[in-house]
Amino acid sequence: MKGTKKELLNSLSEEVAKFEKKKNHKEDPQNNELLHTLITSNYTYHQCMSARIEFMLNKVNQRRYEWGHKAGTLLAKKKIIMASSNSTISYLLQDNSLSVLEPDKIN
């Protein structure tokens, strides 16, 4: 894409605005920080969009990791509950001493 730096930055802003409207999600401070960094830098339009896409993919992969961790934790807990014929494990489950198995809450 050819044009002055100002035209490229305006185009980037328009593309981002379209994306934000389409997704209709809450403002993400990290996104705004990233955009500010990209817009005030000397990168080309395509470099800016590539960086944004990479950022979004990393965010998706992070969510997949968090949900995978949560699913794995719940499975492990279910197996422990199934094996709870052992009175020590039953006691630990009742006592909530196995809180190590609880993943952090995901918003």
Image: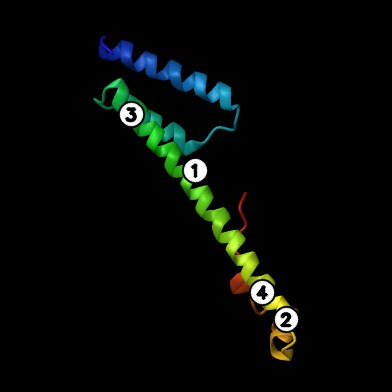
Give how far apart the Cα atoms at labels 2 and 3 are.
51 Å
Q: Position of residue 6 (x, y in %)?
A: 30, 12
> Do callouts 3 and 1 mark residues in contact (Cβ within 8 Å)?
no
Residue 40 lies left or right of residue 13; in this view the side is left
Query: Which numbered disc flags the more N-terminal residue, 2 or 4?
Result: 4
Q: Which mark is residue 79?
A: 4
Disc nearest the viewer among 2 and 4: 4
Which residue is under mark 1?
A: 60
Q: Earlier in the sequence, mark 2 or mark 3?
A: 3
Q: Is residue 46 visible?
A: yes
Q: Which mark is residue 97?
A: none
**In terms of sequence position, does the residue under pointer 2 or pointer 1 come before the other?**
1
Residue 28 vs 72, above or below: the answer is above
Q: Work out whether 16 lies above or below 2.
A: below
Residue at the spot x=73%, y=86% of the render?
Answer: 91
User: Residue 31's image quarter?
Assistant: top left
- Separation of marks 4 and 3 at Cα, in angstroms: 48 Å
The three-letter code of the residue at mark 1 reads: Val
